[in-house]
Amino acid sequence: MNFEYSDKVNGLRARLTDFMQEHIFPAEQEMHRQVAETPWSTPPLMETLKAKAKAQGLWNLFLPLNYGKYSGGLTNLEYAPLAEIMGQVIWAPEVFNCAAPDTGNIEVLAKYGNEAQKQRWLQPLLAGEIRSAFAMTEPDVASSDATNIATSIIRDGDDYVINGKKFYISGACRQQCQLLIVMGKTDAANPNRYLQQSQVLVPKDTPGVDIIRPMQVFGYQDAPEGHAEVIFDNVRVPANNLILGEGKGFEIAQGRLGPGRIHHCMRSVGAAQRALELMCKRVNERQVFGQPLSKQQSIREDIAKSACQIEQARLLTLKAAQKMDQEGNKAAKDLIAMIKIIAPNMALEVLDRAIQCHGATGVSQDTFLAHMYAGQRTLRLADGPDQVHMMQLGRELIKCYAD
Ligand SMILES: Cc1cc2nc3c(=O)[nH]c(=O)nc-3n(C[C@H](O)[C@H](O)[C@H](O)COP(=O)(O)OP(=O)(O)OC[C@H]3O[C@@H](n4cnc5c(N)ncnc54)[C@H](O)[C@@H]3O)c2cc1C
């Protein structure tokens, strides 16, 4: 075990930190203003910042080495502290082309796409020219059990025809979103429920794709990303838009979710670290009952507990990332489940303490705390609710002690 970051990683951390200080933190209010003006188009400021990040080589850092020519040249372990830095601002990962759901979709296309699919969709996604969405969850079935997904994908001659309703499809509201990866059933009668599903590439402008409304998160629209309700009404796409093959939907979903989950956790650590730093500054500045807030024992305890929890989550994230690098995503699945349970809950506790010691300012638009709290709360649902990870982790642990 080596707890030090390598020189290469420290160099990138320094460059990324400088970029955040120079270009991202000072732009937070202006980004909110531009987003409020035209919620579903990419703000001009975002394009300017993307061009700057790309020119500095701070681009596509998330794709690990086993993706060969598509990789940003880093292992998962090396990427973790960089994602942590990006995670301090909700919209910052997009500046570096490291934002979900594109990252997961890029991994799917790079891993499972055929040459034509890569040419058409992977290249512009890697270049940050378009955005994409992943459409699995449905309002009418319990989607945390993906075998319930009911959207039909039926072969008809040289096409597939898609019918169904999805919601909370992140990114689909955006004008720049051109591609939906849709999960649905090609073989609903298959006795093996894990072979019923497939994934298919659907250009967003295909007739029959109807973006009904943006869903909210605690009243936030979460623009410019947003989370759409989408209806697929006799949507017809060529048969070669199918990814990997019929019945491969679960296999692809599993390949997609491991890295996506740990990326969220890396960013949660960054969000919590920023909250802790704000909390420390705040308690040095405020006076209550004749002395600085920082002298109150309960405040010191809040700060100490937060630092302990952040470091625990950071180390578990790094351990999971290292296992992914050394033994593969499948071997690391228990550690990924652990950190997916731990990291958003940890970030929520730290953010809650930071909100409390900021008083009313903590729930206002004047700090990043309230919006980030809403975002972290959704992570206890998205990419698998806590209970599903606990169910699977508990089952694996119990198995170890079966006779
Ligand atoms: C902000 C946000 C963004 C999202 N982005 C996307 C996206 O881009 N694409 C997409 O397809 N989906 C997306 N989702 C949807 C998300 O993946 C689903 O909400 C999640 O999988 C849960 O499915 P469900 O909402 O149908 O809840 P249900 O399946 O109805 O589950 C409800 C609750 O039941 C409980 N539960 C489930 N299983 C168990 C168990 N075994 N034991 C005990 N309790 C259990 C959990 O608490 C769970 O939250 C997003 C959601 C949010 C909030």
Image (tube, rainbow, N blue to C red):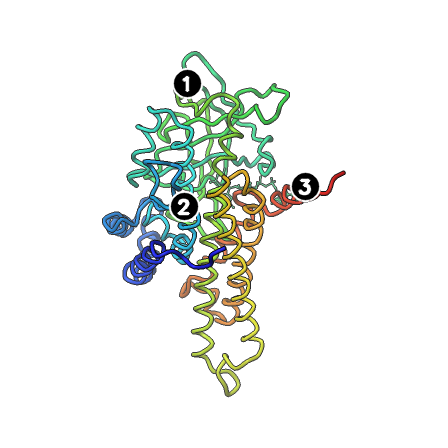
Label 1: which residue? 239
Residue extending farthest to the front is: 1
Q: What's under tag 3, amino acid-wise?
A: Arg
Q: Secondary structure at mark 2?
A: loop
Work out whether 362 lies above or below 130: below
Marks 2, 1: nearer the viewer: 2
Q: Which residue is depicted at the point 46% across and 39% down?
A: 169
Q: CA distance from mark 2 to mark 1?
A: 35 Å
Q: Secondary structure at mark 1?
A: helix
Marks 3, 1: nearer the viewer: 3
Of label 2 and label 1, which has the lower sequence position?
A: 2
Label placed on residue 248: none
Q: What's under tag 2, amino acid-wise?
A: Thr
Give coordinates of residue 61: x percent, y percent: 35, 46
Label 2: which residue? 75
Left or right: where does residue 189 sit relative to residue 183? right
Q: CA distance from mark 2 to mark 3?
A: 29 Å
Of label 2 and label 3, which has the lower sequence position?
A: 2
Give coordinates of residue 140: x percent, y percent: 58, 34
Quarter holding the C terminus is top right
Label placed on residue 395: 3
Q: Secondary structure at mark 3?
A: helix
Give coordinates of residue 38: x percent, y percent: 32, 48
Q: Quadrant of residue 367?
A: bottom left
Of label 3 and label 1, which has the lower sequence position?
A: 1
